[in-house]
Amino acid sequence: MMKSMYGLMMFALAMSGMPALALAEEVDVDSDASVQVTAQGVQVSADASANGESENRAQIRTRGWDNDEDFELELEDDEGSAVSLDDLKQRIQNRKHELDDEEASTTPPTRDVMKNANPVRLAVHSLLVSKDLLGGIGAQVSEIAKQMNDSVASTTGAEMKIQSRGFLSRLFFGGDEMSAEVIAKAAEKNQQRIDTLTALLAEANISADVQVVLEAQIAALKDAQARLKALADREKSAWGLFSWRF
């Protein structure tokens, strides 16, 4: 009986693409210039140019028995700033069209993950390009947006790993707790950043119209973090045949 159970376990490990002994690595979801996440086959990193400067592009890879896919996630940059409310609205609309086109050009499960990430990417873009319209809080808002920008690559890579997790992996081992933990930690930090953004905007002496535009983007950020937290909780609670939890 023990031999058959051991053989079944080894078969399941092989099917899931996991090593017999998996060592969890510490994950940093808030690096300054790049993001690196390694979680049982997922890698997320920002490409660097020849002179060593970040090009704000994350390469996300998933590797497993059931899925083998690479895709690039373009992170937002802070080049240029809106000079008026109309300019801000136009920049947001243009970026939304770009994100929609990018999403449409991908295939499942990448498309679903991109669809989930795009509201956050759009909100980050909106905050970055509004810097010159925010007066004294512009630099603070921009810095918080950059921090959230880094976390997008981390959460997207982890979510891609969860979505591409095969049937056998889930059957035998349940949810992907490592990826879920990456998402949970990022969502918690992002909620703290959202709270700070909300307080800054509430106290700032800025155009009411600009404030309305940015509050809508912050609301999208809140919804995204709530969804990520729910995903992480659901993944952590998913049991498999070989789930030993105490």
Image (cartoon, grey):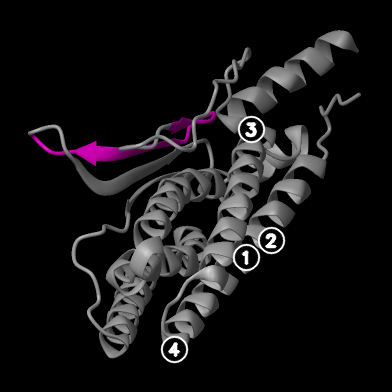
**Closer to the observer: label 2 or label 4?**
4
Q: Tell me the quadrant of the picture where the N terminus can be found.
A: top right
Instruction: Name the one closer to the observer, 173 or 99.
Output: 99
Name the amino acid, label 3.
Answer: Met
Q: Which residue, given by chain and number where applicable, does mark 1 sit on? A: 222
Q: Earlier in the sequence, mark 1 or mark 4?
A: 4
Instruction: Name the one closer to the observer, 89 or 180.
Output: 89
> What x and y, as percent, mark residue 45?
34, 37
Q: Which residue, given by chain and number where applicable, does mark 4 sit on? A: 209
**Closer to the observer: label 4 or label 3?**
4
Q: Disc 4 to disc 3, how far (Cα)?
A: 42 Å
> What x and y, as percent, mark residue 194?
58, 59
Q: Are marks 1 and 2 in contact (CB under 8 Å)?
A: yes
Q: Which residue, given by chain and number where applicable, does mark 2 sit on? A: 226
Q: Tell me the quadrant of the picture where the C terminus can be found.
A: top right
Q: Which residue, given by chain and number where applicable, does mark 3 sit on? A: 178
**Closer to the observer: label 1 or label 4?**
4
